[in-house]
Image (cartoon, helix red, strand yellow):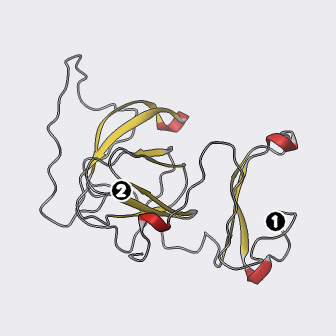
């Protein structure tokens, strides 16, 4: 992944746009989404989409064509770094006092984005798919040999120091301080730190 630079990344601006890219010419099926046999022996998978009862002009969807089905992976395991929580927060005492935090120091030991994530607050209930969780992170290492998947909701990343590069199922996203990345619910990603600590 070191060969990817910020100048080689291209993004599409706006919302509700159509976007398609292919690694090899003819890899995307022409005129249909889910052919019986996809080109190059790829597996067609619908990641997300609107109900089929929607008017055709309002249909939104994300199709990917993979060399291997997404179900081919090791077992999932729950993240338990001792600092990550999901609403509703039923433990502890709530306070109306104003809260302040010093900047989170960069860890001394090797820590990736997920291991260095800490919950500050939140509201709602993840089981009802309502509310938010607010987390910060301090990391000094890229995620090596693992990916993260959030089934509770979308994730918004706002790097404060150094670039953050997320390698997702849809491609590579990169943000520097004063930029953001939004990862939709259910999309697997790996976090790389091209500039060191973030």
Residue furthest to the top? 96
Q: Return the residue nearer the eye: 177 or 58.
A: 177
Q: Which mark is residue 161?
A: none
Residue to which mark 1 is pinned: 34
Distance CA(mark 1)–CA(mark 2):
34 Å
In the rendered image, is residue 103 in sight?
yes
- Label 1: state its secondary structure: loop
For the residues carrying marks 1 and 2, which lies nearer the camera in this image?
1
Q: In the rendering, at what x and y percent does residue 71 appear?
A: 61, 70
In the rendered image, is residue 76 in sight?
no
Residue to which mark 2 is pinned: 79
Residue furthest to the bottom? 40
Question: Which residue corresponds to the image point at 69% horizontal and 79% vertical from the top-left?
Answer: 24
Marked residue nearer the N-terminal end (1 or 2):
1
Residue 98 against residue 33 in the figure, above or below: above
Residue 22 against residue 118 in the figure, above or below: below
Residue 196 against residue 106 in the figure, above or below: below
Q: Quadrant of the N terminus?
A: bottom left
**Image quadrant assignment for residue 85:** top left
Q: In the rendering, at what x and y percent does residue 48 appear?
A: 68, 52
Q: Return the residue nearer the eye: 55 or 122.
A: 55
- Locate residue 79 relative to residue 185 in the image: left or right: left
- Label 2: state its secondary structure: loop
Q: Quadrant of the C terminus?
A: bottom left
């Amino acid at each position: 992944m070191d060969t990817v630079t910020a100048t080689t990344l291209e993004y599409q601006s706006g919302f509700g746009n159509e976007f398609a890219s292919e690694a090899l010419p003819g890899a995307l099926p022409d005129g249909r989404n889910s052919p019986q046999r996809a080109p190059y022996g790829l597996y067609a998978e619908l990641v997300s989409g609107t109900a089929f009862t929607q008017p055709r002009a309002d249909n939104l969807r994300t199709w990917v064509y993979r060399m291997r089905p997404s179900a081919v992976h090791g077992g999932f395991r729950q993240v338990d770094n001792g600092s990550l929580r999901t609403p509703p927060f039923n433990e502890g005492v709530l306070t109306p006092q104003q809260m302040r935090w010093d900047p989170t120091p960069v860890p001394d030991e090797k820590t990736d984005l997920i291991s260095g994530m800490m919950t500050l607050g939140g509201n709602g209930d993840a089981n009802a798919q309502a509310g938010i969780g607010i987390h910060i992170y301090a990391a000094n290492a890229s995620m090596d040999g693992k990916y993260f998947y959030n089934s509770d909701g979308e994730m918004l990343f706002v790097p404060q120091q150094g670039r953050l590069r997320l390698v997702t199922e849809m491609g590579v996203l990169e943000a520097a301080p004063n930029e953001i990345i939004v990862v939709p619910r259910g999309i697997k990603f790996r976090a790389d730190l091209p500039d060191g600590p973030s």
